[in-house]
Amino acid sequence: MSAHYSAELDGALPVVDRAQVLAGLCEILPAQAVLDDTERQRPFECDGLPGYRELPLVTVLPATTAEVQAVLRFCHQLGVPVVARGAGTGLSGGALPCPVGVLLVLSRLDQVLEIDADNLLARVQPGVRNLAVSEAAAPHSLYYAPDPSSQIACSVGGNVAENAGGVHCLKYGLTVHNVLSVSVVTVAGELLDLYADDMGAANLLALVIGSEGMLGVVTEITVRLRVLPPRTETLLVGFATVAEAGQAVAAIIGGGIIPAGLEMMDALAVQAAEDFAGAGYPRDAAAVLLLELDGDADSVAAELTSAENILQTAGATLLRRAQNEQERTLFWKGRKSAFPAVGRIAPDYYCMDGTIPRRAIADMLAYIAALSEEFELQVANVFHAGDGNLHPLILFDANQPEQVERAEALGGRILEQSVALGGAITGEHGVGREKINYMAAQFSDEELRLFQAIKQALDPVGLLNPGKNIPTLKRCQEYRAVRAQ
Amino acid sequence: MSDRSSKLAEKVRAARDAGQALHIRGNGSKHWLETPDQASTLSLAGHQGIVSYDPTELVVTVRAGTPITELEQALAEQGQMLACEPVNVAGRSTIGGALALGWSGPRSAWAGTLRDFVLGMKVLTAEGDILSFGGQVMKNVAGYDVSRLLVGSRGGLAAVLEVSLKVLPLPEQELVLSFTNDDPLAAMRRVREWEGQSLPLSGALWQAGALMVRFSGRTTALSHLLSRLGGEARDAVVFQRHRELSAGLLAGTPPLRLYRQRPLSAIALDQDFILDHGGRLLWARAGGDLATLMAAANAHAVESPVAGVQSGNAVTQHWHTALAKAFDPQGLWAPAGEAA
Ligand SMILES: Cc1cc2nc3c(=O)[nH]c(=O)nc-3n(C[C@H](O)[C@H](O)[C@H](O)COP(=O)(O)OP(=O)(O)OC[C@H]3O[C@@H](n4cnc5c(N)ncnc54)[C@H](O)[C@@H]3O)c2cc1C
């Protein structure tokens, strides 16, 4: 069943007077900040999920919080939908424009406003790139922990909207664990500040983080900085079977070790990454683990011995410790470039994002292998093993409509299986437009109704990012009916 | 050790149909809170027990009426803990009550707060429906994060029936050191220096001219700290008592809690106070108007243990009101502490 917008299942979009909207926006913003022609809007028609494309009515690039407020106030008055966009690296169509709406691009709000090294915090605008925060903090021997593989490009505002994770979030947490406060502009253009440690009332900050631009537009973020660890050790570990690698992951955690990172790749992903990055991964391994330990020197030494013992016992066929910073970076380069690397071995790939309990890793990989045969499409697996967050990459050719359909159906089966195993349809990429149907696999109608009530409480007319994140009950009925056939 | 969710749901539906307000209660360990007039009680105290616990998953799922002390014992048997140290008043609080209040202990400034460790919840709504949000996995961004939203909501949105929490390994060893220091900020600056050296901090508390610090970690990492840092070794029980709100300024009805985003920022209070969480939390008695107090403490928010949130602008209040209506259109829930 298609996830594309349908007036019948998702409700009709409002009727908007384009000329009036354009004239109003040109009064609020300088001329160069308002794009209304197809050519200049083309780069914004999709995010990192190219299968979903739409041109917005008009694109605006405000440069201040006051301008963001003015745009929202104006759109609110006229009943015009607004879709926020950061860097557009999202993988679920969250920033997909609305054809009758304004696309609010936050990339010009790109200032690191403050690094307060004493108090271990950074204050940034939403368009600041994730990696730029750590770069600005580095002179103080500090860094920002959440490190999505897209960190060179993705924006902190987009990270907040998706609750982005990274390879180090097993130990240091997701975005929600590292944000101290945000400023949010409401649908009506009002500004509020929300704090992580606000107690004595519901924690509104937690609600905003991961809300995919549905509840407000984030215009400033204060993040927690951490002290760069004095010692870091990275292990590259090979296994002859996927099952042994899965068991090794459980044994490490069960052994009382919380690694800074614990990543797994299967044979196909290892081959692709090795061809791309030459990171020294064992080409003959069925699965590779990357394990990183960090902290004070004594603790790391103790954990390293313990981890090496556990991995030997678990049947590691290769156990290599990075000898220097250069080799450590190389080990990680293989992992962090896994998506583009897999992208080279097929015309297109479709990245899934289910989460499962760690104990089910081996079963899930066997299930995916069976699906790969059934649908006759190759699947490479890269994942945050420590968190049980899978990224199966389904290889296909987008020029063959029939292959697109097969890839989507295969992906859907993986998501449904994630839910069946006690997990979730998305761990970090969000629901966006792409997974809108599968919300019905994870939630009951009553649960979805509460989500809708929350949305309605804060955005009564539904102007912010319409059609994303929370499906209509009608769409859910249709999904369940199709599945029952 | 029983599952009383269907009985509880029945009670909610009956109250709703009768137009009766309901007040959610755990063990009543927060003795300073009063049951509101004209509300009957929905007691979660009997809804107890660990539903599932798999140490290698680092997740425990537990019913809301389970005493924190019991839960922590079960975790300790497997070498694990609740790293956020939810406030456990006199050792009698239930985990549901701790979530409703949302207060975390000394370790939370480094390990993360109670809210941070919540992975999912099963809740009972004002409509009498039992709904699940989040889950038992580390990452889940499907839909809004209702479970974490509810932390601190003081029984005003929904009743928590079950919670899944991330757990962490117990440290091999703990070391508590005390230092005489009249200047609370100088004391916290010292703590910041140790943090800069990546020492495994797990508590930093200043009160009455003394800085009390706790380190937790591998034995090898702690062994030379006493000789290196000086100070006087103390029994770890001081942090335990602090977490139970049973000593000094915190005993009885707790004072106001002032939240500070910048732990080393200046403090200009002319009364006794406690600086907690490495400087991020300040406990002080009420006096004068709140805005002046907040400014003097360099705090962005102040919470009254009795009345809840005391800050935030009109827009924030509007969001709270709108959400309360979304969760509870008929106004069934009567949060504690509002009684005259
Ligand atoms: C190669 C590759 C690797 C990736 N690896 C990871 C990974 O390891 N971990 C991970 O979590 N993700 C990963 N991603 C996904 C993506 O990078 C993240 O979701 C990122 O957080 C999106 O940020 P963005 O600035 O690109 O947001 P966009 O794609 O522009 O927007 C994403 C969503 O956020 C909303 N939004 C953006 N800015 C704001 C704002 N200021 N206020 C309110 N709403 C806003 C949008 O409306 C949209 O719904 C990867 C993507 C790619 C292409």
Image (tube, coloured by chain):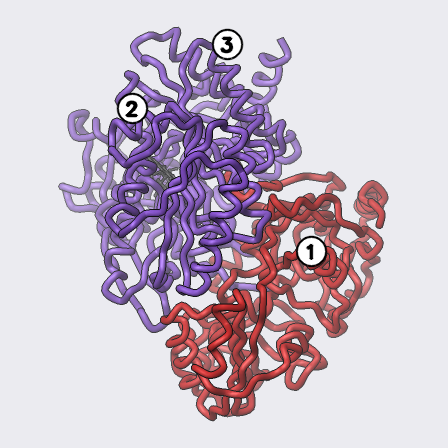
Chain colours: A purple, B red
A185 to A94, vertically: above or below? below
Q: Nearer the viewer, residue B61 or A167?
A: A167
Of badges 2 and 1, the one in the foreground is 1
Identify the image quadrant of residue A448: top right
Q: Nearer the viewer, residue B223 or B177?
A: B223
Residue drawn at the location 38% of the way across and 56% of the way down: A183
Ligand 1, image quadrant it occupies = top left
Position of B56 with respect to A306 (left or right) is right
- Tell me which amino acid carries mark 3: Glu
> Which quadrant of the rendered structure holds the C terminus of chain A?
top right
Could you say whether the residue bearing mark 2 is in a helix, strand or loop? helix
- Tell me which amino acid carries mark 2: Gly
- Residue A343's mark? 2
| Circle 1 Cα neighbour tier, 10 Å, few/some/many (<14 / 14–19 / ≥20) | some
- Tell me which amino acid carries mark 1: Leu
Q: Is mark 2 within 8 Å of ligand 1?
A: no
Residue B99 visible in the current orientation: yes
Residue named by callout 3: A374
Residue drawn at the location 43% of the way across and 59% of the way down: A300
Image coordinates of residue A437 in percent, x first then y, are: 52, 23
Image coordinates of residue B204 in percent, x first then y, are: 51, 76
| Circle 3 Cα neighbour tier, 10 Å, few/some/many (<14 / 14–19 / ≥20) | few
Residue named by callout 1: B75
Chain letter of disc 1 in the image: B
Residue drawn at the location 60% of the way across and 44% of the way down: B57
Q: Nearer the viewer, residue A361 or A62?
A: A361
Could you say whether the residue bearing mark 3 is in a helix, strand or loop? helix
